[in-house]
């Protein structure tokens, strides 16, 4: 290595003049681009010291741009979901409706009456926002919104059963994504776990024996979420648990998880318990998510009897778990879609689930034609879409998939993930396939450009 070879490297200023970096200036700004250029030059110097030839200025600019986009750019980025998994937890769960986004933007743009009583002209309570809508939709007496469903369950267990027993079937001691376990949450709440029955079979008398022993503050039913209990299996229905609870003076809490307000059976799926059904069955407290089948922003929602829900609003933990103004604004807008009977048209999750197979076929064939004009012979094939989000495990909907030609589907999938915007696809039967069910209409043009460019590079 010679000093002369190091001197062949351009200065930072000259490198910044390269088109590959100049076109990124509006997006990333001068500071980050300078840092990326310096990093590219530093790595080049190390390579030259190890005996490599100095890269030219264009190659260095490309390196700097790659470093900028991969290491310095904001980590949280929009992606195009072509997996067919509607509520994809890893991809942010439910996309939001236009009205929901507009409501959140309006709340973010300036001040709001988050904790201000407009008629009275003094401090109010943020807990009132969305509560009336939730009660109207579910038939509950009272409602409370926190930041996610795990928080809702934690708050309810701690507020209603700390230091006392909570009955739960062994078949419902579930673990869902991210290591969230019902026994762990119960332990953190201070409630005492009382297991009844066996993994596959729990009977009424199992609950009766435990209730007769005393010391029980709550009966908990937990939604199976991401698995299904089949075969030689028995569980006690919610209505029967409520009947038992009333006989012993013990309320029933129902952790629904997904938060469906519409009947999934109407869309060709199995029946997912709805919040309204739990309230009507007599569950004293019902907890569910805002960003799964409800289709709104991340939130944990508690509805139920006022005598149990209202005291939770004064619990110190409620402040730690409280939602911000954007969540509340978005949740209100989402709930209005249900009250206006327009959820299947306006809430993306339900619009995707309700999309007819004929429409999916039309979209897939339209994609096929556009790619064919670019010389790419893709195939439209039959497939299945999944609900996701811990809802309706094993349940799928028929769809149409666009199968892309690729000698190495894994390599093409990686290339699609690595672009801007990233495209997340799936590989099925050694073919990379795209499911139109989870692609928003406004994303189609960008998606097909990305697919065309990356497929032709392979």
Image (cartoon, grey):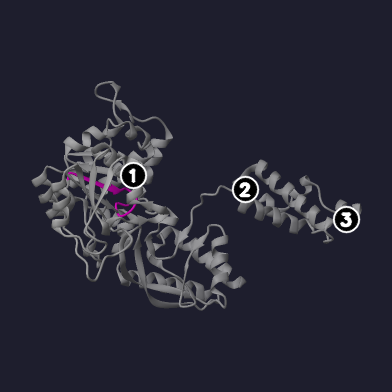
Q: Which of 132/145 is in front? A: 145
Determine contact: label 2, label 3, CB under 8 Å.
Answer: no
Magenta stretch: includes residue 288: yes
- How far from the left and from the top, in percent, is residue 221? 23, 52
- Residue occupied by mark 1: 187
Question: What are the residue bounds of the magenta stretch?
Answer: 284-295
Q: Quadrant of the C terminus?
A: bottom right
Crowd class of label 2 (few under 14; some 14 to 19; many from 20; radius 10 Å): some
**Snapshot quadrant of residue 321:** top left
Q: State the mark number for residue 72.
A: 2
37 left or right, relative to 192 = right
Point 43% across, 35% down: residue: 109
| Horizontal and vertical percent position of residue 257 | 29, 52
Q: Earlier in the sequence, mark 3 or mark 1?
A: 3
- Disc 1 secondary structure class: helix
Question: Left of 341 or right of it: where is 3?
Answer: right
- Disc 3 secondary structure class: helix
Q: Position of residue 358 (x, y in %)?
A: 31, 72
Please provide percent x and percent y for residue 17: 74, 49
155 left or right of 32 in image? left
């Amino acid at each position: 290595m010679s000093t002369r070879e190091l001197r062949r490297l351009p200065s930072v200023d000259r490198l910044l003049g390269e088109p590959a970096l100049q076109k990124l200036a509006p997006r990333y700004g001068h500071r980050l681009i300078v840092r990326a250029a310096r990093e590219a030059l530093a790595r080049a110097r190390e390579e030259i010291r190890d005996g490599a030839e100095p890269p030219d200025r264009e190659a260095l600019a490309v390196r700097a741009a790659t470093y900028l986009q991969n290491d310095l750019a904001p980590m949280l980025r929009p992606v195009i979901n072509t997996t067919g998994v509607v509520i994809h937890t890893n991809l942010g769960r439910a996309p939001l409706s236009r009205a929901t986004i507009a409501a959140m933007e309006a709340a973010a743009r300036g001040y709001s009456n988050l904790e201000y009583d407009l008629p009275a002209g003094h401090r109010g309570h943020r807990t009132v926002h969305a509560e009336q809508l939730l009660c109207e939709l579910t038939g509950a007496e009272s409602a409370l919104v926190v930041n996610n469903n795990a928080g809702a369950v934690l708050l309810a267990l701690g507020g209603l059963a700390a230091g006392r027993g909570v009955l739960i079937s062994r078949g419902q001691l579930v673990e869902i994504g991210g290591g969230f376990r019902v026994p762990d949450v119960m332990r953190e709440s201070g409630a005492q776990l009382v297991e009844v029955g066996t993994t596959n079979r729990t009977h009424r008398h199992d609950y009766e024996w435990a209730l007769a022993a005393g010391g029980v503050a709550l009966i908990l039913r937990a939604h199976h979420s991401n698995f299904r209990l089949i075969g030689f299996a028995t569980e006690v229905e919610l209505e029967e648990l409520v009947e038992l609870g009333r006989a012993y003076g013990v309320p029933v809490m129902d952790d629904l998880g997904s938060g469906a307000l519409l009947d999934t059976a109407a869309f060709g799926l199995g029946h997912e318990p709805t919040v309204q059904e739990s309230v009507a069955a007599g569950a004293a407290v019902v907890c569910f998510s805002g960003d799964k089948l409800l289709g709104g922003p991340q939130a944990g929602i508690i509805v139920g009897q006022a005598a149990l829900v209202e005291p939770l609003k004064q619990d110190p933990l409620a402040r730690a778990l409280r939602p911000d103004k954007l969540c509340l604004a978005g949740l209100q807008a989402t709930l209005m879609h249900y009250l206006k009977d327009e959820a299947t048209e306006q809430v993306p999750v339900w619009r995707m689930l309700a999309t007819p197979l004929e429409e999916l076929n039309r979209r897939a064939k339209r994609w096929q034609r556009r790619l064919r004009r670019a010389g790419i012979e893709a195939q439209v094939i039959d497939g299945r879409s999944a609900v996701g989000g811990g809802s309706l495990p094993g349940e799928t909907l028929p769809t149409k998939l666009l199968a892309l030609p690729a000698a190495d589907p894994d390599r093409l999938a990686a290339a699609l993930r690595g672009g801007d915007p990233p495209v997340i696809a799936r590989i099925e039967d050694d073919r990379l396939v795209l499911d139109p069910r989870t692609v928003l209409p406004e994303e189609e043009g960008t998606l097909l450009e990305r697919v065309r460019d990356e497929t032709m590079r392979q």
